[in-house]
Image (cartoon, grey):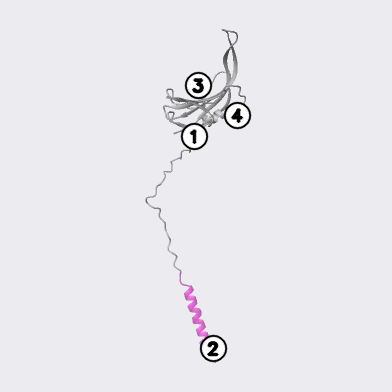
Amino acid sequence: MPLVRAACVGLLLAAVACGRGASSEPRQPAPAIVVSPPTDSPVEPASRVAEPALPKDAAVLDDLGIAVVLPPDARRDHQVKTRRHVVTLAPHLIVELQFVGQPAPRSVAELQAAWGMPGSDELGRGDPQDGVRHLALAFEVRIGFEGMPGQTIHTFKRVARVYAVLPLGGESHVLCTGYIEREVASSADPDLERVRSICLSMRKR
């Protein structure tokens, strides 16, 4: 009986030793999988900036080199010789787009110097580094109408203008002028916003 018990104990110790030996073996790490990018895939330069997409309803004015958003019900007059587009929204509301073969004003201060006048009130401005630079002004203009036959009566009325420029390069630009032939007291005036939105929608082609 002691011999049988000793044999069993010996077998048990051997099994434990075998088990310990199996668990103490170091496991081999799984091989790392490295995925290399295809050599023929294009690489975009880090400095490249995407151009803003043109609106779907933009009208392309090839002779000016721009696209602009125009209301579908607006009346358009294309003057080929002078490279001018006249857009009539209403009898008192007109927008002119004109190609100018000169460098664009470099700041709103230069716009003010070119188009401002004594007694004008500023209704808004925008001076981005790239894009459309604009200035909105309200002022008085002199008008005349016929009174008695052969007699012209002169008076003054308050109007507003939007002047905006889009540089096409170092030597040319497009001038957008919005005419509001009535008094405008605020930058939130809906007629002012209508002509300004057309000017600000200009994009180079």
Circles 2, 1 touching at the beta carbon (< 8 Å): no
Circles 2, 3 touching at the beta carbon (< 8 Å): no
Q: Mark 1, residues whose alpha carbon is within 10 Å: few (<14), some, or many (≥20)? A: some
Residue 58 is labelled as 1
The residue labelled by disc 3 is 114
Residue 185 shown left or right of residue 80 in the figure: right
- Whether residue 8 is in magenta: the answer is yes
Residue 190 is labelled as 4
* Residue 145 point in image, percent of width and height: 58, 13
Q: Mark 2, residues whose alpha carbon is within 10 Å: few (<14), some, or many (≥20)? A: few
Instruction: Give the distance between the C-alpha atoms of the residues marked 4 and 3, in whole angstroms.
Output: 26 Å
**Mark 2 vs mark 3: which is more N-terminal?**
2
Give the image quarter of residue 46.
top left
Mark 2 against mark 1, which lies toward the viewer? 1
Question: Magenta part mainly helix, strand or loop?
Answer: helix
The residue labelled by disc 2 is 5
Start and end of the magenta stretch? 1-26
Q: Amino acid at mark 2?
A: Arg
